[in-house]
Image (tube, rainbow, N blue to C red):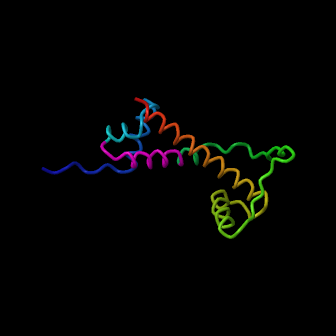
C-alpha cells in the first residue's frame, strides 16, 4: 500500500493559516496533530507566515522618531559584525549606509524581535493551558 504524497510547504502553511484563523487559541502541538506534522514544523510555518504578512503589510508612514527624553539614549559601537548585520537589514529596504538609515534599521529589527518574542510567549502560554 502506498502512502499519499507529502503536502508541499505552501499547502501546509495554508492549512496552518486556516486553522489559526478559525481558532487563534490553537497550540502548535494541536495544529501539528491535526495536519500530521511535527510541532517544530508548525512553529517554522507560523514564523514564515508572519514574515510573509509583514512584507505584505503597508509600510507605516516614515516619520522621524520623536526625540528621546533627556538621558534616554542607547549608543552602540558599530563593530564589524554589527555593521554587517545593519548592511543586511538596510539591503532589505534598499537604504543607504547613513546614520539615519542605520538607526531606522536597528529600530525596526528591535521592534520585530520584540514582536516575535511576544508572539512566541503567547503561543507558549496558550499551548500550556490545561
Residue 17 rendering spot, x and y as whole percentages: 44, 39
The kind of secondary structure the magenta stretch mainly shows is helix
Q: Does the magenta segment cover residue 24?
A: no
Residue 104 rendering spot, x and y as whole percentages: 73, 53
Above/below status of 11 relative to 100: above
Q: Residue at x 52, y 45 (%)?
A: 50
Residue 110 rendering spot, x and y as whole percentages: 66, 50
Above/below status of 22 relative to 113: above
Query: Is 72 displayed left or right of 2 in the figure?
Result: right
Q: Does the magenta segment cover residue 40?
A: yes
Query: Is 87 displayed left or right of 126 in the figure?
Result: right
Q: Residue at x 75, y 64 (%)?
A: 77
Count the marks: 0
Quick one: which residue is furthest to the right in this view?
70
State the quadrant of the C terminus: top left
Residue 71 rendering spot, x and y as whole percentages: 85, 48
Query: Is 34 displayed left or right of 17 in the figure?
Result: left
Comparing 94 with 125, the one in front is 125
Magenta stretch, residue numbers: 36-51
Quick one: which residue is furthest to the bottom in this view?
80
Amino acid at each position: 500500500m502506498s502512502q499519499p504524497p507529502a503536502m508541499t510547504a505552501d499547502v501546509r502553511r495554508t492549512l496552518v493559516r486556516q486553522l489559526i484563523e478559525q481558532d487563534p487559541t490553537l497550540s502548535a502541538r494541536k495544529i501539528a496533530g491535526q495536519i500530521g506534522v511535527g510541532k517544530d514544523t508548525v512553529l517554522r510555518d507560523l514564523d514564515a507566515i508572519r514574515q510573509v504578512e509583514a512584507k505584505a503589510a503597508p509600510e507605516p508612514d516614515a516619520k522621524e522618531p520623536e526625540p528621546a527624553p533627556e538621558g534616554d539614549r542607547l549608543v552602540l559601537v558599530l563593530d564589524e559584525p554589527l555593521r554587517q548585520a545593519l548592511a543586511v537589514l538596510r539591503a532589505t529596504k534598499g537604504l543607504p549606509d547613513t546614520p539615519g538609515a542605520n538607526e531606522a534599521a536597528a529600530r525596526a529589527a528591535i521592534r520585530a524581535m520584540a514582536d516575535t518574542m511576544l508572539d512566541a510567549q503567547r503561543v507558549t502560554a496558550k499551548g500550556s493551558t490545561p
